[in-house]
Structure formats: C-alpha cells, structure tokens
Amino acid sequence: MLGRLNHVAIAVPDLAAASAVYRNTLGATVTDPQALPEHGVTVVFIELGNTKVELLEPLGEGSPIAAFLAKNPSGGMHHVCYEVADIVEARDRLKASGARVLGDGEPKTGAHGKPVLFLHPKDFAGTLVELEQV
Amino acid sequence: MLGRLNHVAIAVPDLAAASAVYRNTLGATVTDPQALPEHGVTVVFIELGNTKVELLEPLGEGSPIAAFLAKNPSGGMHHVCYEVADIVEARDRLKASGARVLGDGEPKTGAHGKPVLFLHPKDFAGTLVELEQV
C-alpha cells in the first residue's frame, strides 16, 4: 500500500532564517515561499533529488502548527508524508485495522492540491503521518 | 552540497510493534531487525522506493536514543540523514559557516558502514541532521 516518501515536514519559527540555513549553509535548492492561508502555513520546499523537505511557518491565527512550535520553539520534525495510490482504500484499510484517522476521516485537499489524510501519531510510533494520493 | 535524503530515522520503544504497524497496517516492506551494538541500537528499514525510514530501538546500556525516548515514550522522529559526496569538505564548510558538528568533529563509521557526522539541532531548525558520505 505504502508508496514513496513524498516529503518530510519540519516546522520552523522563522522561515527566512531556516531557508537561509538550508540554502547557504547546507547548499541546498530551496523554493520561494508560498503562502497557503487555507492551511495556516507558509511553505518552502528543499529539493533533494529523490524527495523533498517541506519547511512550514505558521500563517495567521490558529495555524495547525502553532501548538507544535509552542512546545518546540526552535522548530522540529513535524510529520512524514507517504504516497498512496488510492486514499479512500487506504483509509478504509487503516480504519479496519484500528488506526485512527484525524478529523472527520474524509480526505482534504492538501498543500499540493491532492487528497490527503492525517493519521494519529499514537498509532504510528509517535509520528504524525500524512497520506497523499498521487 | 546536499545530496539525496538517505533516510528519516524514527526512534521507537518497541521495534517489533512498530515494524508490525508498518508491515501490516501500512503495507510496507520492512527488513529484518539488525542489532548494531557499537551504535547502541537495533534497526529495521522500511523500503519506500525513493528512500527509506529507519526505525531505531535502544540496545544495551547508554543507547544514544535512550534520552530521546525518555522524553518521547511513544517514539518520534529522531533525525534526518542527507547524503554528501565528501564529508570532510562538507564538515569544513559547515564549521566555517558557524554550524556545530557534534562530538569531536571527526567522521565516524555509521550504521551503513559509511562515514557520518551529526550536526547540532539548534543550528538546523530544531532538527538533528546526519550527513553520510556516499
């Protein structure tokens, strides 16, 4: 069922500073910031050849990463995103196995314009898992 | 300088349980456990096509992931590992930019038998970064 690693997401308090570290200190290719007000974040992508790292900065009130950054003020790894071919089939299989899907269980349109779901960290070794249909 | 994402490492309190979740619930390919006493961990790899996830369980006294699991008893994302072509050149460039290399700054032989270094999380958006020469 599980496909490629789509991205690793790192929440950061200062997107410009974190982008500069990746671009200048680590010599990586970093995209321009993209504000996603409907997701409460501004993002950049670090292009790594085989996959990407997504840096997330809170945008607006009630950002979904605000609580995480309150607990981790320097930033930190926030979630991993795995690709699946059919997100509804994946969800049904996960629910049948007892895993918890966050929210109302219906796929939403993610930051890349594709259907996504998030899974409960307690069911996946303490790691917030995003599934994206590709 | 930065190459591919070699792996994302997730520290887990129970490797058999976490492997079962990835194998059975998520339908992933999980390798057999490999004890690495010199690194204080037992590992499995989840093969994702473009990269891999490494699940780490503490092994023996003084495991380098023991403190992390004490703080995160359910487990959690522990580090990301990026590939570099020349680890000594990468280290010298990082040190010149003011980034902190952990330990004595000399590359060690990592879990895959290749030279590795770890970088201070405070210098990389709260994320422990491993560099591996490939």
Image (tube, coloured by chain):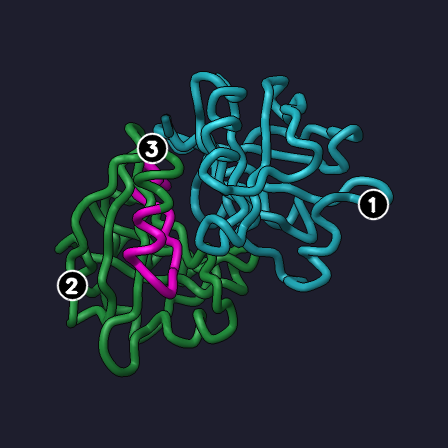
Chain colours: A green, B cyan
**Is any atom of residue B78 visible in this view?**
yes
Please give the name of the residue rendered at 69% of the width and 53% of the height, measured from the top-left corner.
B13
**Is any atom of residue B23 visible in this view?**
no
Question: Would you call the spot at circle 3 few (<14 residues within 10 Å), some (14-19), or many (20 or more)?
Answer: some
Image x and y of residue B33, in percent: 67, 32
Q: Which chain carries label 2?
A: A
Look at the numbered disc 2 and give the secondary structure of its residue: strand
User: Are the numbered discs 2 and 3 placed on the same chain, yes or no?
Assistant: yes
The residues colored magenta run A2-20
Please give the name of the residue rendered at 57% of the width and 49% of the height, measured from the top-left corner.
B78
Q: Mark 1 points at which residue?
A: B62
Q: Mark 3 points at which residue?
A: A27
Q: Nearer the viewer, mark 3 or mark 1?
A: 3
Q: Which chain carries label 1?
A: B
Image x and y of residue A131, in percent: 32, 53
Q: Nearer the viewer, residue B118 or A3?
A: B118
Q: Name the residue under label 2.
A: A35
Please give the name of the residue rendered at 22% of the width and 48% of the height, measured from the top-left corner.
A133
Look at the numbered disc 3 and give the secondary structure of its residue: loop
Q: Which of B17 and B106 is in front in this view?
A: B106
Furthest residue toward bottom: A61
